[in-house]
Image (cartoon, coloured by chain):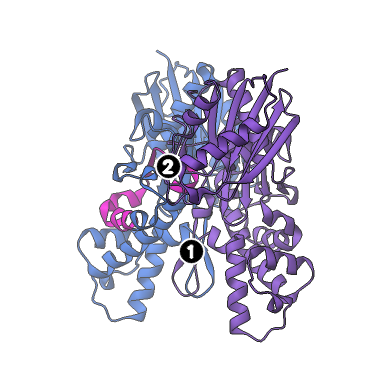
Chain colours: A purple, B blue
Amino acid sequence: MKTHLAIDFGGTRSRAALFDDELRLLRRAETSSKVEEGMDAGLKRLIDLGKSVIEPGSKPASIGIAAPGPLDAETGVIFRALTLPAWPDVPLAKTISGAFDNLPTFLQNDADLGALAEYHLGAGQGADPLIYLTISTGLGGGAIINGQLFTGWRSHAIEPGHMRFSLPDGSHRRWEQLVSGTALGDWARHRLRATDSPSSLRDLPHVDGSAVGAAALAGDALALDIVAQAGRWLGLGLLNLLHLFNPAAIVIGGSASKLGDLLLDPARAIIRQHILHDDFYDDGLIRPAAFAEDICLVGAALHAKLQLDGGASRSRL
Amino acid sequence: MKTHLAIDFGGTRSRAALFDDELRLLRRAETSSKVEEGMDAGLKRLIDLGKSVIEPGSKPASIGIAAPGPLDAETGVIFRALTLPAWPDVPLAKTISGAFDNLPTFLQNDADLGALAEYHLGAGQGADPLIYLTISTGLGGGAIINGQLFTGWRSHAIEPGHMRFSLPDGSHRRWEQLVSGTALGDWARHRLRATDSPSSLRDLPHVDGSAVGAAALAGDALALDIVAQAGRWLGLGLLNLLHLFNPAAIVIGGSASKLGDLLLDPARAIIRQHILHDDFYDDGLIRPAAFAEDICLVGAALHAKLQLDGGASRSRL
């Protein structure tokens, strides 16, 4: 049976899975990445994780790796990743390939692979252009244009979290500083300190984005207000993406997508207010992702399969 | 000799030109559009203008039309154009084609055709992705991705003037309201009313964007300050485009490009301060356009030639 090995290398958790050629999940494993132990130990953990999902004696047709950017998909190197502060540039594809009998190995940005998975198998099927956003601790993105992953000049395209917005005090912030889980946590802690508003969040030892999300889903007024504020900033950024890419769909994944309409309704209100005309937008255009935490594994296996099957516009290792 | 007729339909002026198959200009004419006289009279003026550049007895191979959007390139219809307030939806390609023996006729957004001209024949040759911006009274844009005009889902892609920015008072504005000639004029009139700063602009009966540009180029301190302010907003919007598209070049045309480094240096300073990392940007990436006011004529003829030569992924009339 033809199989594909997928590895999702994250700053905190890493996952590996074996898929068949129809992208059905066969085996799966995950572990703590422990990047603080350094590059050599970290790469060994990743290789062991990948080997743990392969049947003894069998050999996958390809390996797909998802990793946080910035990275160079052509050379398979991750460089200056914010989640790997103490690591040098990492020749990830070459190292992994070398540990697996030099199997053809394809590295790609995790959010780009999310876009690929949602376009071929998820909530964005048939939608071209497709924009995929992943909103969790940070905010990443990917796009499909003319059926292909859009990666830009040096494979860095679609860093929507770095769009800039000015604040009332004249300073400006990146979009991810206004929309991500980090922003929800920061605002909530500020509001709890600066006001006397009652909130279930006051009972918690530490208030982060997940806590704010959970409180909002439970009906906490202060948390709901903060989620709505993030939703309005989300709407302003989505307006930019709609006016620039005229996408057929924007698929929203990551842990923030659990907030659903609590986050999306304020965004939709901003969009309806300011969109240039109706042809840019209808309510079905902005959709929650079909895949959850395994989206990058599916995307990595799919990417490796597509590259192997001949799309191979990129070099392989 | 194989020739292509190009018509650039503008809200104020319209132009027509005949090109040979190597895109060399053979004949050219222009006239006031007089759109206030209504659609029927306006279309007749445009047809007469086109006929005035064709040698009697000869027949072009194709017609390319540039027009302000929004428009539908597939059906050749301009609709709800801001510059044509009193006109209904205009079946422009069909009407023009009908007046020229049903020649194959291709309508496209003027800024998209600017991108095409700069990519094939101008300052963006070999740069992929390429973003083209035209900054004059308003701000339009186009993009080339994988060698093709990028038009998005419903051919509305790349409306960068509609990116949103918040102001210190909490309100927000479109990018074109912060960067275009209209913005320069508005700010200058406000500053002249609200301050006693000396300025050569005080001697003028009406201060618009062109006047501010001319005064800045002549060294007027107040005008220079206003151009620098627009340049900083320009930089913030360019940051968004760099982080989203990772373009190999951003080519800037339109009358604002005459301001050169007076406008671009403050933009570059903002970009260097906030760019995610060096791989997204070097100083040569942002360039003035090679073509001036005839850019849309060149683009329209080139588009018609390319469609005729077989790229023809679009329907033709």
Q: Amino acid at mark 2?
A: Phe
User: Percent from the top left, x then y, of residue B317?
Assistant: 62, 25
Label 1 is placed on what type of residue?
A: Arg
Name above or below for residue B225 compared with residue B271: below
Residue A192 shown left or right of residue B141 in the figure:
right
Quadrant of the rendering where the N terminus of chain A is positioned:
top right
Residue at 63% x, 65% y: name it: A230
Residue identifier under label 1 = A173
Q: From the top left corner, tell me how far across and down residue A196 is, in percent.
A: 66, 87
Q: Residues within 10 Å of mark 2 (few under 14, many from 20)?
A: some
Residue at 72% x, 46% y is A292
Q: Is residue B217 visible?
A: yes
Q: Which residues are magenta?
A: B242-269
Is residue A199 toward the left or the right of residue B46 in the image? Answer: right
> Disc 2 to disc 1, how far (Cα)?
24 Å
Indicate the quadrant where residue A119 lies: top right
Q: Chain of mark 2?
A: A
Numbered mark located on residue A79 in the image: 2
Q: Is residue B15 above or below residue B277?
A: above
Q: Chain of mark 1?
A: A
Q: Residue furthest bottom?
A: A196
Q: Is residue B152 something that shows in the picture? A: no
* Residue in front for this viewpoint, A146 or B118: A146
Tell me if mark 1 has few (under 14), some (14-19) or many (20+) residues whose alpha carbon lies within 10 angstroms of its own: some
Please state the horizontal and vertical placement of residue B218, each as a whole percent of the image: 20, 60
* Tag shown at residue B32: none
Q: Is residue B227 left or right of residue A163?
A: left
- Give the secondary structure at mark 2: loop
Q: Work out whether mark 2 precedes mark 1 in sequence or the reverse, and give the earlier one.
A: 2
Classify mark 1: helix, strand or loop.
Answer: strand
Numbered-mark total: 2
Q: State yes or no: residue B257 in magenta.
A: yes
